[in-house]
Amino acid sequence: MLEGARRTARAALEAWRRAASARNMRHGARHVTRAGLAADLARLGIAHGDTLFVHSSLKSLGYVEGGAAAVIGALQDAVGPQGTLLLPTYYLPGGTVRATCDMKDYVFDPRRHGTHMGRLPEAFLASAGVRRSIHPTHSVSAWGRHAAALTEAHHRAPSIFGVDSPWQRFIGCERAKVLGLGISMGPVTFYHALEDAMGEAFPVPVWAGETKLLTCLDHAGRRWDVPVRPFDPAIAQRRIDHPGRGDLRDYFHREFDAAGLRVNGHVGDAASWCIPAQAFYDHLRQMASEHVTIYASAAQLAARPVGRA
């Protein structure tokens, strides 16, 4: 009962915070429309038929008339009826993969569990025609031509980002692109696809302990035991998305610009970027062969100048 009251209080506080933020944005920011966002995406190189994995910061776009639903509409307009959108709709009740693995009696149920990834993924998850993968920590949702194929096997994948996961299937899609809306090169889970593909050959020992089996229910209520291997928290402190790793984020920014792979532009008010998925993956593998990964030390960055590959 006490925990239920706490959840209610947290939900009320979050609703108040979002309403206050929306009021401030409405009065202080430039108004952005769905059509304007779609035009900005086209200038960034997004075209009909593309398959996009989208990482985003909704507030960075400015005040969007119509809110998150209008942003989703703009993304759908940009890729067209033959295109596909994927958004992270992760659910991590423990806060981290490791803490979630340690929870007793946790069962992921897509029929009642939402996402901790923010307002845009929340709205996407509630949109018509969206399919959601079954996974206890890293569920992905998709809309469009390849939505079913990208999400249907996640609960049978041997690891979160491994063979048959949405990430590995996404890399193989024609015209697949990773899109960052208002984010740096830090919070991009696409990086982990290389770790799981390489396994123990990856140059950094990123995992801690043994693989756990977490229980999920699918959309029909059937039970599945899904393998999840936690990350080593000490290694994670060195990762590109850690607040103290601005040097690594800047390096990746400059590296992918120097390689000619990153297209930069503004979508609404947000500094945004786009990279073809296969080229992104291949370049990450090349960098890893030269001892630079999303965990690289300052010394490793200094030993490999930007643009050397």
Image (cartoon, rainbow, N blue to C red):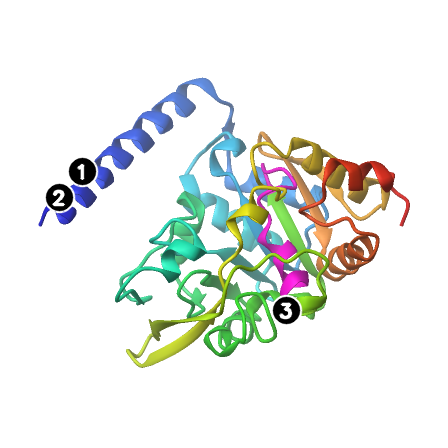
The extreme left residue here reads 1
Ranked by sequence position, the earlier of labels 3 and 2 is 2
User: SS of the residue at dot 1?
Assistant: helix
Tag count in the figure? 3
Q: Nearer the viewer, residue 120 or 145?
A: 120
The amino acid on which the numbered mark 2 sits, given as a three-letter code, is: Ala
Q: Secondary structure at mark 3?
A: helix
Q: Looking at the picture, does residue 22 appear above or below residue 181?
A: above
Quick check: 12 above or below 69?
above
Cα separation, mark 3 vs mark 2, equals: 41 Å
Circle 3 or circle 2, nearest the eye = 2
Q: Which mark is residue 9?
A: 1
Which label number is shown at residue 5?
2
How packed mark 1 is, by other alpha carbons closer than 10 Å (few <14, some 14-19, many 20 or more), is: few
Q: Label 2 to label 1, Cα distance in Å?
A: 6 Å
The relative height of residue 183 versus residue 28 in the rendered view (above or below) is: below
Closer to the camera in the image, 41 or 53: 53
Bounds of the magenta span? 181-196
Given residues 91 and 66, the one toward you in this image is 91
